[in-house]
Amino acid sequence: MVTILDVARLAGVSKATVSRALNGKVFVREEVKARIMQAIEETGYKPNQLARNLANNKTNSVGLVITNGLYNGPFFSSMIYHAATNSEMHGRQLVLADGKHSAQEERDAIDLLLSLRCEAIMIYPKYLTVEELDEIIEQSETPIVVINRELVRHRSQCVFVDHQQSCAAMMAYLLAQGHTRIAFVAGSEGSPTGESRLAGYHNALRNAGIEPDPQLLVRGTWSTDSGYEAGRELLARDVPFTCVLAGNDDMAIGVAKACHEAGLRLPQDVSLAGFDDSVIGKYYNPSLTTIHVPMDEMIRHAVGIVLTPEDNASCSHQGELVRRESVRTLL
């Protein structure tokens, strides 16, 4: 591998002179700089951009922490896409760090990005609590924004959706279509998003004078496979229901497969709805009624908060009901 020392030898200068010419901080005579550039071209030397940026205390990069358990699926693929493109629009490179499987590993991922001197950091947490996230922001000199979690002490450094209210809006729609026996496929236990949507489900039923039936509640883990298994479990209980609301669109598609295998038609026999407005739901047959989560807008605001804070404020987003073909009106 060609090194800076090879360039220095060919150009007939010291290693330090090559470094100064590349960094541009100290004046180097034009004739010397020309020899150095010629030597770089002849040797094919590629400067270590990260090392140079660290020396300059500037990396022009934005970090994103997200656990690998969330990578698998169109919703989070879309989120990473928007994070990358919005960072690029600000002239920054996106650096992805894996939060893995615990709060400590999410902390380690944040520390990694700090050690790389990212200009700003976005966190999509799964394990860190609101209190821990507030503490991390207070202790960091690097701008940090938290996505999909409402902070208590740093509301100007978070973007989030009221998932409980979004679920209430979906439930109001389903109840208005005459569905009173609504099954719910919840997300992973302990997930703040999942627990908020589950609370919205329970509250909406009780507000309608309907006591939630524990036999109509099953859990998945956000994946399509888990939705399929949850749908099979629900059907095996042999309890009546006219509609299934899944905690996200991926699980809803899994439930649909379980219903088809049981000989049930959508929406003639069972209505189905989800959350997130993943692209798969739009093109599924029947197309999936869902709640649109404005992830593109959330990411745009998150990048803006850490890079241009003077132009951005705390941003609470609202989910939007998307009515499609998978819900039948019973009235």
Image (cartoon, rainbow, N blue to C red):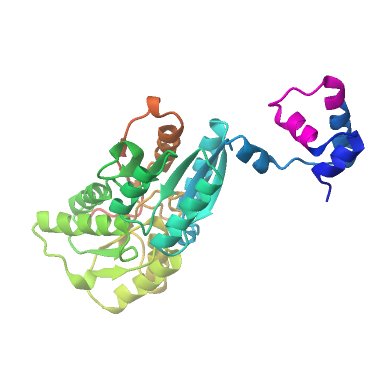
Could you say where residue 12 lies in the image, as x and y percent from the top left? 90, 34
273 or 203, nearer to the observer: 203
- Residue at position x 21%, y 57% in the image: 199
Relative placement, left or right, of 327 versus 12 is left
Q: Quadrant of residue 211?
A: bottom left
Could you say where residue 171 lies in the image, as x and y percent from the top left? 22, 53
User: From the viewer's perspective, is residue 279 above or below residue 47?
Assistant: below
User: From the viewer's perspective, is residue 257 above or below residue 320?
Assistant: below
Q: How many marks?
A: 0
Q: Main secondary structure of the magenta part?
A: helix
309 or 162, nearer to the observer: 309
Relative placement, left or right, of 217 versus 127 is left
- Residue at position x 29%, y 39% in the image: 155
- Residue at position x 33%, y 43% in the image: 160
Q: Is residue 257 visible?
A: yes
Could you say where residue 30 lies in the image, as x and y percent from the top left? 83, 20
167 or 234, nearer to the observer: 167
Q: What range of the chain is rendered magenta?
A: 16-33
Q: Is residue 74 visible?
A: no
* Magenta region includes residue 31: yes
Could you say where residue 210 lies in the image, as x and y percent from the top left? 11, 61
* Magenta region includes residue 236: no
User: From the viewer's perspective, is residue 318 above or below residue 218?
Assistant: above
**Residue placed farthest to the left in the image?**
209
Q: Quadrant of residue 38?
A: top right
